Amino acid sequence: MKFFLLFGLTLILAFPAFGLEGKIDGKEVPALQYAMDTLWVLLAAVLVFFMQAGFAMVETGMTRAKNAVNIMMKNMMDLSIGALSFWALGFGIMFGTGNAFMGTSGFFVDASKVDAYASLAWTSVPVFAAFIFQAVFAATAATIISGAVAERIKFSTYLMISIVVTTLIYPISGHWGWGGGWLGDVGFTDFAGSTIVHSVGGWAALAAVLVLGPRIGKYGKNGETRVIAGHNIPLATLGVFILWMGWYGFNPGSTMAADVSIGAIAVTTTLAAAAGSLTAFILTYLKYKRADVGMTLNGALAGLVGITAGCANVTPVGAILVGVLSGSVVLVSVLFLDRIKVDDPVGAISVHGVCGAVGTLALGFLDAENGVLYGGGFDLLQAQAIGVLSIGAWAFGVSFAIFKALDLIMGLRVTQEEEEQGLDYAEHGANAYPNFNVSTIK
């Protein structure tokens, strides 16, 4: 507490030296508000930053021990590469003043060039604070792909994918919806990124999986689906709790201001996650007569992804409905993808791609002011559909073309021997559990 008070006081005293003008839409804000807005955005950025640890744990726990080091390295590189590439190009493409398609200014983020980021005029925070917050969002979009392609992708090629997502695919989608692009003009609403962040990562993941193909042994010769169990469910569970906690930075932090709305957003976020988790648990229990922990975990994440678009615009009851819908859809999607032999070890495509789209569309019905169920007509729903379809087509189409090109140039998949041996040894010469003996209970 003393740290935050001291930090806040420092911000207030340093007010004249801030790089941004301390204005919202051209009007100056009080110094205290400016300082608190900045402090809140940085705190939210730290929470979203910690989500990277959550993703790493979920992906590692839900896959086999022989690939744990590889997954940790991919998550580390997503953050490291994402910070640099988004600083150099991505932030300018996303928020730089430009045209309806992309930003054309503000590259190599420079806090002294405030005019280059006109699309951020609605927030008082400094350019650097806005950049840090959005950089961890970019890393999130990239790392969604990591889980879907786990256990069979070349590490070197994956690094190129991370660069492409954080430099081009995510920033352009973000510009369309948040950076002054054409989707903003049609009324598309995605408060914290169900579609702009999560579906972008999900559809890019789908493209990568289709190019890669399934893991060896996942599908039998007769078409049957074989379970390849994760090696550490407690680790995956801890990862989900970390992600849920990080979402309190993701959603409330997207206000980019320390105002009273953050409490309501935290409530809708919590209710949707809880409803998603409970729904997935109940449905899997009814289907399999057992309490399935993996699907319950993904149900919570599905609820979180689904509510991200409308967390500031729905009532608590609306948030619960989004959670129930997301928790139901994630189960149907996972089973469907397995049926058509799309191998996603952690359910990332279903959780982020499908539920991100579903949550965004649901806002067209449940928006407390403009939703269909509140007498607002179909204009918002139409705008949401346009956003979901256009961003989905962009993220999947461009990703598929680029990943195909990378496959031809560098190769996307490891050899059969490397895959069977495990990527930890083949790619990194390491073993996550060198002194751990595994025994089989028969």
Image (spheres, rainbow, N blue to C red):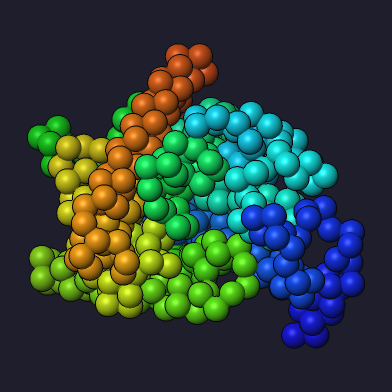
Q: Residue at x 48, y 20 (%)?
A: 406
Residue 330 x %, y %: 25, 56
Determine which quarter of the picture holds residue 129: bottom right
> Is residue 89 shown left or right of residue 333?
right
Q: Residue at x 39, y 31 (%)?
A: 394
> Is residue 325 shown left or right of residue 18?
left
Closer to the camera in the image, 46 or 408? 46
Residue at the limit of the structure toward the front, as seen here: 27
Relative to 352, does residue 403 appear above or below in the rendering? Answer: above
Relative to 142, does residue 366 appear above or below in the rendering? Answer: below
The quadrant of the rendering that contains the N terminus is bottom right
Residue 335 x %, y %: 18, 50
Residue 236 x %, y %: 43, 63
Q: Residue at x 64, y 29 (%)?
A: 104
The quadrant of the rendering that contains the C terminus is bottom left
Determine which quarter of the picture holds residue 88: top right
> Is residue 160 shown left or right of residue 107?
left
Closer to the camera in the image, 65 or 388? 388
Relative to 257, does residue 378 appear above or below in the rendering? Answer: above
Q: Residue at x 51, y 46 (%)?
A: 178
Residue 96 x %, y %: 64, 37
Is any part of residue 132 visible from this angle?
A: no
Is any part of residue 195 visible from this angle?
A: yes
Residue at the limit of the structure toward the top, as seen here: 409
Residue at the limit of the structure toward the bottom, as seen here: 1
Number of numbered discs: 0
